[in-house]
Image: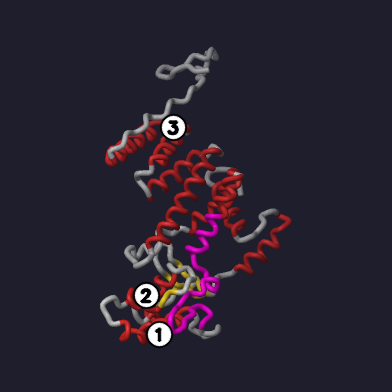
Amino acid sequence: GGEAGGARGRAAAARARLAALGVRTSAADALAGALRVAEVGVPAVEVRTLGGLRVLRHGVPVPAGEWQSKKARDLLRLLLVRRGRPAPREVLMAELWPDEDPDRVGNRLSVLLSTLRAVLDPGRVHPPEHHVTGDRTTAALVVEHLDVDVERFLAGAAAGLAVAAVDPGAARARLEPVEALYGGDLFEDEPYADGAAPLREEARAAYLAVVRALGDAAGAAGDTDLAVRYRLRLLERDPFDEAAHLALVRALDAGDRHGEARRRHRLYRDRMAELGLPAAPFPAARTRLRVVRGTGDGRAPEGHAQGT
């Protein structure tokens, strides 16, 4: 509550989070909202891939000892990037044991599949193939039975960006909780994980689109600080993004942070020079009407051009 300081931003973030959970935030719907949060609860099995691979059961990370070997985690990565599509056993074996005869490692793959099933359902609450299916030729994750953060992120990003395209004013409420899901690039703990590059790039591109839309929405609403923050996040991921550099310079200049704007423009010129590309000039200064306090005659203070 309250309108001072960062209270409005925190309140907006809280409303966005509740909206993502399907909770209405009017006083009349308070009880229904609380019940909805209780229904959502903590996922029985959550697979986190953004920023690094982790599996949580009822919110608690699976102990390292339960994996028995790094190969079991590698198998999970291989199945996750298939996004529910069956993977041929020969392909899995070639990825996991590239220098060994496939005829000799078939049993090892079966053991790893059993280990993975035990990690995802140690109490055997579900049938054996509830989370991981397999036969003599293929294996696959049943992603519908798992809470996989990258899948949730991509679905939320697509839905939020579709809304932003037709109603930019609604973009922030839809996209802020989506942006918060992105804890880092896919399998950041294993950046060279086999076969992960296409999904990593898809998630990264979606994240950049989400942040760009949020920056545009904040700028349109006149929230300079938030617009600057989102532009900086874009440049964190891609320091050569020319559009992000120029949008940041414009946001700083519009917020009367002229020294910062000039410094960021110099940094932008340096980045373009590294690429051998010409840099755009500093955005034209805004025309301002300056009224000198005490005179009321519209004269501009020294160092400022008088405008209309």
Q: What mark, if any, has residue 209 been given in the picture?
A: none
Location of residue 259 in the rendering, given as x and y in whole percent from the top left corner:
37, 32
Residue on which the image places disc 2: 91
Q: Which amino acid type is shown beneath numbered disc 3?
A: Asp
Residue on which the image places disc 3: 253
Q: Residue at x 46, y 36 (%)?
A: 251
Location of residue 125 in the rendering, given as x and y in whole percent from the top left corner:
55, 84
Q: Residues within 10 Å of mark 2 (few under 14, many from 20)?
A: some
Give the Cα separation between the discs numbered 2 and 3: 54 Å
Residues rendered magenta in the picture: 129-158
Q: Which amino acid type is shown beneath numbered disc 2?
A: Val
Q: Is residue 137 magenta?
A: yes
Residue on which the image places disc 1: 110
Mark in the foreground, 2 or 3: 2
Q: Residue at x 46, y 83 (%)?
A: 135
Mark in the foreground, 3 or 1: 1
Q: Residue at x 47, y 68 (%)?
A: 83
Location of residue 279 in the rendering, given as x and y in whole percent from the top left corner:
34, 33
Q: Quadrant of the rendered structure where residue 204 is?
A: bottom left
Q: Earlier in the sequence, mark 1 or mark 2?
A: 2
**Residue farthest along the left direction in this orientation:** 99
- Secondary structure, mark 3, is helix
